Amino acid sequence: MQKNKVTCILCPRGCTIERNVQGEKIELNGFGCKRGLEWAKEEFTNPKRILTTTLHVKDGEIEFVPVRTNLPIPKDNIFEAILLLKNIEVVAPVEIGSVIMKNILDTGADVIATRRVSKKNSSND
């Protein structure tokens, strides 16, 4: 029998959900609600995460802008997405919520800015 455990993140209870696999039979135990059960099913079969990183800003008052995906993307795509974003440079000004990249890696998630970055004041040069 193969066993795996995850801690549910949907509420403060933090239920420990255990998956037991024996042949074709899969059993989930330890969930405290239906939402936790559904979350655990997805976490065991297709885990997803929100990607957060920073991108370089050209002519910005600050050098980097924080960005994130607006939806969780498959965990297996995280490193590929980071490599794709690695060489992206945005031009100031940048507004909160600006879409930097639509539908990254065909996941349905957009990469959006999470901070406003004004254009560098040329008198400060």
Image (spheres, grey):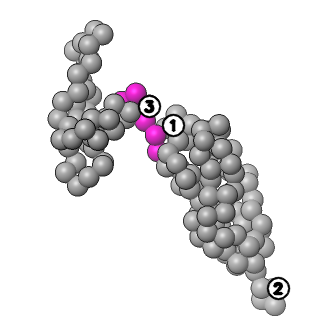
The amino acid type, in three-letter code, at marker 2 is Ser
**Element under disc 3:** loop
Q: Is residue 48 magenta?
A: yes
Mark number displayed over residue 122: 2
Q: Is residue 9 visible?
A: yes
What residue sits 23% from the left and 27% below the top? 28
**Element under disc 1:** strand
Magenta span: 44-49
Q: Are marks 2 and 1 in contact (CB under 8 Å)?
A: no
> Label 1: which residue?
74
Q: Are marks 1 and 3 in contact (CB under 8 Å)?
A: yes
> Label 3: which residue?
46
What residue sits 30% from the left and 49% below the top? 10
Q: Indicate the position of residue 25 as horizontal and vertical percent values.
A: 26, 13
The amino acid type, in three-letter code, at marker 3 is Asn
Instruction: Establish if 74 lies above or below 62.
Output: above
Q: Quick check: 115 left or right of 27?
A: right
Q: Quick check: 79 left or right of 121?
A: left
Mark 1 and mark 3: span between their CA atoms? Answer: 7 Å
Q: Indicate the position of residue 22 as horizontal and vertical percent values.
A: 24, 12
Q: Nearer the viewer, residue 92 or 95?
A: 95
Mark number displayed over residue 105: none
Give the tally of numbered discs: 3
Q: Earlier in the sequence, mark 1 or mark 3?
A: 3
Q: Earlier in the sequence, mark 2 or mark 1?
A: 1
Q: Is residue 80 magenta?
A: no
The amino acid type, in three-letter code, at marker 1 is Pro
